[in-house]
Image (tube, rainbow, N blue to C red):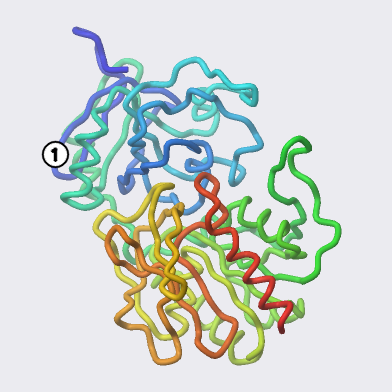
Amino acid sequence: MPLSHGQKPTACLALADGTIFYGKGFGATGETQAELCFNTAMTGYQEIMTDPSYAGQIVTFTFPHVGNVGVNPEDDETADPVADGMVVKWDPTEPSNWRSAGELSDWLASRGRIAIGGVDTRRLTRAIRQQGAPHAALAHDPEGNFDIAAMVARARAFPGLVGKDLARDVTCAQSYRWDEMRWAWPQGYARQENARHKVVAIDYGAKRNILRCLASAGCDVTVLPASATAEEILAHDPAGVFLSNGPGDPAATGAYAVPMIREVLEKRADLPVFGICLGHQMLALALGATTVKMNHGHHGANHPVKDIETGKVEITSMNHGFAVDSQTLPAGVMETHVSLFDGSNCGIRMTDRPVFSVQYHPEASPGPQDSFYLFERFVASMDAA
């Protein structure tokens, strides 16, 4: 909650333009620099903090009540938080939920992540929308000692995400199999024992729930690192290839990912390919399109997206700061989905092959489940092949 009169702040958020926000620190102590974004989701703060797509970013939560259901090991999307920091309006209260296994502040502290509460997140969100995602420095010191000039200087020195290949930082170190399916009441996470198709998933920063969705749709999933070659992928003789979500500049990751995707498409003309988020951008680049940095990106679980081919509108979960420029899509590649917020591209497909991708997150963790059909479409394309 906000600091009371005369109370000394224990955390500070400094933006590169010199704007300063003071508040109450929780989680780890120290300082970090990153790009600042905001997320409008009302649930899923643990999934958001552990989403590898947030590497290099501090997340401002627009929903004021963060931490009130605690944390638990089942909701992690990767082994540890990837987002660099957290900004909230109210500092967390004691958790109240039957699934809670600990407090958010302790969880952040044990994983080296800094958080600040008591911030006017409405003001901060408006600033991000109007001026673009700023570079920021976030510090937590229980004694309240902050060198503001030095923090602003470090925020200004942060290199930003343009030109940064962060997929290498968050990808798996070696290949592994995945058979855990989506959580369901009352058994929790079951195992896929009757998979119909062998799928190779390229890990650019894959969320666990995406892999669970593939398993639930009937896939025998083998996960390979982001640097996997076309030869290594095709050696598994997959029925389909999945390109995962991930962080950073798609053009930078594309330096090695695009040649691989093109070679796979050349050698297996019948192979279904499905991409999500960064995987969508990688596919678009491989097909000849370009990507652009967005002003403040899309981060939240309430984004309306229109399916151009059916006219249906899906409420989706999104997390991206770069987008595919639909004006650069080549012949033979059509736009399939668009954002109803700003008209930006949210999906493409090849017109003559079972190759498609979407910008948003159909695994819905957190978020609505309108788009799970895309995993079923991927499996159906493998059935047809």
Where 197 falls versus 353 (above or below)? above
| Residue 336 position in % (x across, y down) | 43, 75
| Residue 46 position in % (x across, y down) | 52, 36
- Residue at 64 percent across and 22 percent down: it is 98
| Residue 264 position in % (x across, y down) | 61, 85
Residue 134 or 220: which is nearer the viewer? 220
Left of 183 or right of it: where is 321? left
Amino acid carrying label 1: it is: Gly
Locate the C terminus by quadrant. Answer: bottom right
Local secondary structure at mark 1: loop
- Residue at 37 percent across and 43 percent down: it is 39
Residue 6 or 100: which is nearer the viewer? 100
Residue denoted by label 1: 18
* Quadrant assignment, res 222: bottom right
Find the residue positioned furthest to the right: 193
Residue 309 or 20: which is nearer the viewer? 309
Crowd class of label 1 (few under 14; some 14 to 19; many from 20; radius 10 Å): some
Left of 138 or right of it: where is 306? right
- Residue at 54 percent across and 28 percent down: it is 107
